[in-house]
């Protein structure tokens, strides 16, 4: 499958670097603009499937570049901006943007918005993007279907269990703090407290055990939890 | 008219003195002028004086009216457009006022400009700081989730809240251009505010308990309301005593109002502090224990409330906890438009 290209127009090099690295992890091809007097040249040379665009840029602002890109292409444009006021969002959308993300943001938000816009841009849901999957050792999680796979066997998870496992697998071999897990699992309807988290951890452990992947989720005292999916191969 | 007579009193006294002086002089010199001549002279002279007074009053009428109507000047501080009169004195007064007015207008516009620039600068600066904040936050993800990372995360959040406070404080000066009252689902707004502050809840081991009817609507500005709820929630969480406690958020409805109570089981506020919590920069005994307390939160909340036409009140018993109560109208409040 052809990798989709994302053009990052952001003058903070660290931020554009971080975004680039993250998106590469999810199988995107990324291009970052270096010379802000030649944005359109970079765009034409690419050409990208989607553009991430900052508002405050040297020389011309993001709205200007948005109009320039719109005059040539219909590719999705997502603004990334520190300005959270409604007026700026309206201006952005009127200049042809498709969505607006305010700083500081989480990777997940950017990724989710990129995916949804690409899906819409590619015409229909008939040609969906490849399903997202996370691998850790022999474990494979399909976070969109809440399904976990291990050595050919599959098991279904609840949404919360899936979020929990996704976070642990994403940081395979490293410690994830309880607070981090609580933060990710918190929803508007249910406030997860320590006891509830314990229950979810127990359930996930049991499901892994049923799959034959016993003892993968370790408790690290005073710190949190760690998944060690690669440990068995050592 | 009164002022006119006061102004003319010295002249009248002088005139009467003169009128008495002349017959006395005649009497002293021994010239036995007939009394009628003297009386005629006095009458003639009085007629001329009267004419003078009438003309003078007509010429100066506007100036006298202006000067008498002090309350009028106090309420309408603009320099009057129509001339005060065409006599030399009113014109001179008018010119002098014009010079002073010009001078103060110039000074005022310099200051207004400076404040505007300052607000623009602050806004720009805060927005610029958000990029480094994003970078730190994203970089942090690649760290192991250790206590150090959590601690940095906590500080980051403080920075963010601090920046938000700065932005909203500077926006308050331009409030009139920056609000729009709309229908807001109270439960929705409260849930969003709680979710936004979930890390604080998690870190402190606290739980929210929200009991609000799903259909209740209040009229407010979404952005400012979010800011107010955030401030109160942050206070409630910070001043809570410890793990396992709940922050109770309830609403009650009367015929005209909806009351929203945000109640913590915290350390409470002492009686003498309670009177002053809405004052700017007041941090109180408890506030000093928390570094992020600037004493501006509650002050801003009350300012915003009064501008949006809501009310806010605070009740507390030391040791028992604190309740902050918002009162919203559930019909649009026209005074705020």
Image (cartoon, rainbow, N blue to C red):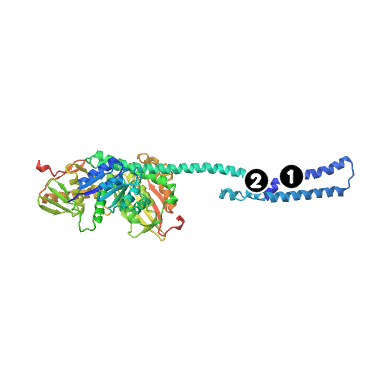
CA gap between label 2 and label 1 equals 22 Å
Which SS class for mark 1?
A: helix
Of A40 and B276, nearer the camera is A40
- In which quadrant will I find the C terminus of chain B? bottom left
Q: Position of residue B309 (x, y in %)?
A: 44, 54
Q: Chain of mark 1?
A: B
- In this view of the protein, can residue B98 be seen by the observer? yes
> Mark 1 = which residue?
B11
Is A124 on the left or on the right of B51, as rendered? left
Q: Position of residue A232 (x, y in %)?
A: 10, 43
- Residue at the spot 39% in from the left edge and 49% down from the top edge: B315
Q: Which mark is residue A15?
A: none
Is A112 on the left or on the right of B125, as rendered? left
Is A35 on the left or on the right of B30, as rendered? left
- Residue at the spot 86% in from the left edge and 42% down from the top edge: B26
Q: Chain of mark 2?
A: B
Of A6 and B204, nearer the camera is A6
Q: Are marks 2 and 1 in contact (CB under 8 Å)?
A: no
Of B88 and B301, nearer the camera is B88
């Amino acid at each position: 499958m052809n990798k989709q290209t994302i053009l990052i127009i952001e003058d903070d090099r660290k931020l554009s670097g971080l975004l680039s690295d993250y998106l590469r992890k999810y199988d995107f091809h990324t291009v970052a603009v270096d010379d802000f007097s030649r944005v359109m040249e970079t765009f034409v040379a690419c050409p990208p499937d989607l553009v991430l665009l900052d508002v405050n840029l040297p020389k011309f602002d993001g709205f200007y570049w948005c109009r320039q890109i719109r005059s040539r292409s219909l590719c999705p444009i997502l603004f990334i901006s520190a300005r959270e006021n409604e007026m700026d969002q309206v201006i952005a959308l009127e200049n042809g943007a498709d969505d607006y993300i305010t700083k500081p943001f989480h990777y997940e938000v950017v990724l989710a918005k990129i995916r949804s816009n690409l899906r819409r841009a590619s015409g229909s849901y008939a040609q969906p993007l490849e399903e997202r999957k996370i691998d850790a050792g022999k474990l494979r999680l399909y976070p969109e279907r809440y399904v976990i796979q291990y050595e050919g066997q599959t098991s279904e998870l609840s949404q919360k269990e899936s979020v929990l496992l996704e976070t642990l697998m994403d940081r395979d071999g490293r410690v994830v703090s309880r607070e981090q897990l609580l933060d990710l699992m918190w929803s508007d309807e249910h406030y997860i407290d320590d006891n509830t988290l314990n229950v979810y951890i127990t359930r996930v452990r049991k499901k892994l055990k049923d799959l034959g992947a016993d003892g993968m989720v370790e408790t690290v005292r005073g710190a949190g939890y760690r998944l060690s999916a690669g440990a068995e191969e050592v | 008219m009164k002022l006119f007579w006061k102004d003319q009193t010295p002249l009248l006294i002088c005139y009467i003195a003169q009128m008495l002086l002349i017959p006395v002089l005649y009497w002293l010199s021994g010239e036995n002028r007939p009394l009628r001549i003297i009386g005629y002279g006095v009458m003639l002279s009085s007629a001329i004086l009267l004419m003078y007074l009438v003309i003078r009053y007509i010429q100066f009428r506007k100036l006298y009216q202006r000067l008498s109507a002090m309350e009028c000047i106090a309420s309408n501080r603009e320099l009057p457009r129509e001339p005060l009169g065409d006599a030399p004195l009113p014109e001179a007064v008018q010119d002098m006022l014009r010079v002073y007015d010009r001078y103060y207008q110039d000074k005022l516009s310099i200051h207004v400009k400076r404040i505007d620039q300052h607000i623009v600068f602050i806004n720009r600066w805060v927005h610029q700081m958000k990029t480094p904040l994003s970078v730190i936050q994203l970089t942090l993800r690649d760290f192991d989730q250790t206590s150090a990372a959590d601690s940095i995360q906590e500080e980051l959040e403080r920075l963010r809240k601090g920046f938000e406070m700065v932005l909203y404080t500077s926006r308050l000066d331009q409030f009139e251009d920056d609000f729009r009252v709309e229908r807001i689902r109270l439960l929705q707004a409260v849930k969003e505010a709680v979710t936004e502050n979930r890390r604080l809840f998690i870190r402190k081991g606290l739980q929210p308990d929200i009991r609000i009817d799903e259909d209740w609507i209040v009229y407010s500005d979404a952005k400012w309301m979010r800011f107010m709820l955030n401030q109160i929630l942050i206070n409630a969480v910070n001043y809570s005593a410890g793990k396992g406690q709940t922050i109770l958020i309830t609403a009650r409805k009367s015929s005209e109002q909806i009351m929203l109570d945000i109640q913590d089981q915290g350390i409470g506020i002492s009686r003498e502090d309670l009177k002053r919590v809405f004052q700017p920069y007041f941090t109180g005994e408890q506030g000093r224990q928390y570094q992020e307390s600037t004493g501006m939160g509650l002050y801003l909340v009350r300012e915003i409330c009064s501008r949006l036409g809501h009310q806010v009140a605070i009740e507390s018993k030391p040791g028992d906890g604190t309740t902050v109560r918002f009162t919203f109208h559930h019909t649009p409040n026209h005074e705020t438009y």
